[in-house]
Amino acid sequence: MIQISHVSKSYSEDVPALVDVNLVIAKGEFVFLAGPSGAGKSTLLKLLLGAETPNDGQILIDGRNVSRLRRSHIPLLRRKIGVVFQDFKLLLNRSVFENVALAVEVLGESRNRVQQKTWRVLKSVGLAHKMHTKAILLSGGEQQRVAIARAIVNEPDILLADEPTGNLDPDLTLEIMKFLRQVNARGTTVIIATHDPDLLARFNKRQVVLDRGRVVADG
Amino acid sequence: MHRIAYFLKAALRGLTSNPLVSAISIVTITVSLLTLGTFYLVYLNLRATAASWGGEVQIVTYLAEGLPADEVNRLSDEISRMPGVSAVKYVSRDDALERFRKDLGGQSGILDGLSSNPLPASLDIQIRERSRAAPQVREMAGQIASLRGVDDVQYGQEWLDQYQTAVNFIRIAGAMLGAFLLIGSILVVANTIKLALYSRREELEILSLVGASKSFVRIPFLIEGLAQGVLGAALAGGILYGGYRLLVDRMSESLVLNLGHFDPVFLPLPMILSLLGIGAAVGLFGSALSVRHFGRP
Ligand SMILES: Nc1ncnc2c1ncn2[C@@H]1O[C@H](COP(=O)(O)OP(=O)(O)OP(=O)(O)O)[C@@H](O)[C@H]1O
Ligand SMILES: [Mg+2]
């Protein structure tokens, strides 16, 4: 369970990125984080990951205060959260396999387990045949799927996806969304940030709408 | 345990991804350790030479001409009882001439023209190891010189002491120079690792975001520094040994140097291992300096 209460965040004094945000997201929920560009969607995801700290308020994940977490405990939090970054954050001169395997190696799993888990997840996103291709040689949509594969390879409790369909054509978008719902069906809490109205219209899920850092609609 | 393979792979990637920078770092360590090793090697050999002389350190007591045999025995006994004296050996005039002839070797012909033996008889006095310092020897020589029947006393301790002072100076100067160079090497390694961290900052950010612990991020860089240190040390050891062999071979070819009984020595195994250890420590410490602030989420 994620509890966000009275959270504010500003990078500089003039423009606040988030203002007094209150949210509760239950375990296993599927939530869209909507709103125009600059509304604060990515910022909220970064706070959940402990990549940024709020100026005010608190964020509890499974009862633990994220911003009060000791530095040495942040890696443990992040291992429970898979993230698809808006800019993917792939290592472009490494292979698809290496990019995904990295997330498993971090856990200290055996070579066999690393290979097995990586291969399985790449197959599920339809990229097994490009395993040894360098990420830089992939199309935008393929890179996005590598990013998704890396986010879910460890079957995280929470999946944060920042515009996961931003670069995909309608067919692929549909496929990826189906895939994310499967992940959700297996018990993972899924939070998707998007400003794509089509996507929101097509899926009848809870939508939290942000505008200039405030929650303006939830339901 | 599974991580070791990952760490080694990552460290190797670091070493090879920027070969020139790694090479500079390795060579710096090599130069420092080579300096340190060379000074120590020179010191060892000079000391070994001094020790071989030290074994011969003696006070030569020339006896008054025509000293009767019982007087010689009395004198010999008296000197033997002096503290610090380990042995007294009587060298008769004939013995002295024979020894001289041997020392001259091929040129001993010049002695053939002599009608009488010009050399005096002497007592050669061996001094115990712990009594060989110059002031002690000087005092001992003075006592012996005042004995009846002694004509003259000679000893070379003063010169030997100066030689040993010079040898010690070389050792200290080498250690200081080496220490300076080592500190420099640490900074060079630190800089190399800083560059490596910088060139891989994207990867490090990603590692951190997917939940890598601090040590998981840092260890490959520590291994990279360690490897640079060990490689540098191994290179220094190799060059030092190669240079040593070359020099020793040259010297054994040259008869002149071979005449003096000089037994060259190389660094003993513990010292070679120490060089490797110092190299490893320099590399590890250098990278630790840079990595200190890194890998925090
Ligand atoms: N690292 C940063 N430093 C300074 N300001 C930032 C930073 N990141 C975001 N901001 C600002 O915070 C506000 C919210 O940005 P955020 O990236 O969260 O929006 P978003 O909803 O994700 O937008 P988009 O849909 O374009 O991705 C914006 O005004 C943005 O300029
Ligand atoms: Mg964004």
Image: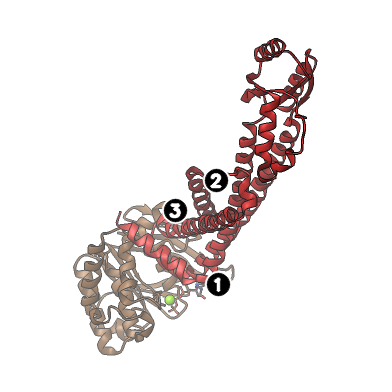
Left/right of residue A181 with respect to residue A139 in the rendered view: left
Ligand 2 quarter of the rendering:
bottom left
Question: Which chain identifier belongs to the red chain?
Answer: B
| Chain letter behind tag 2 | B
Quick check: B65 above or below B199?
above
Amino acid at pointer 3: Arg
Residues at marks 2 and 1, CA–CA distance in whole angstroms: 75 Å
Dot 2 lies on which element? loop
Q: Residue at x 64, y 46 (%)?
A: B175
Alpha carbons under labels 1 and 3: distance apart: 28 Å
Secondary-structure class at tag 3: helix
First of labels 1, 3 by sequence position: 1
Chain A drawn colour? brown
Q: Position of residue B224 (x, y in %)?
A: 46, 60
Q: Which residue is mark 2?
A: B265
- How packed is label 2: few (under 14 Cα within 10 Å), some, or many (20 or more)? some
Please tell me which residue lies in front, B114 or B277.
B114
- The numbered mark at residue A71 is 3
Question: In the rendered structure, which amino acid carries the disc numbered 2?
Answer: Val
Q: Which disc number belongs to residue A15?
A: 1
Q: Is mark 1 within 8 Å of ligand 1?
A: yes
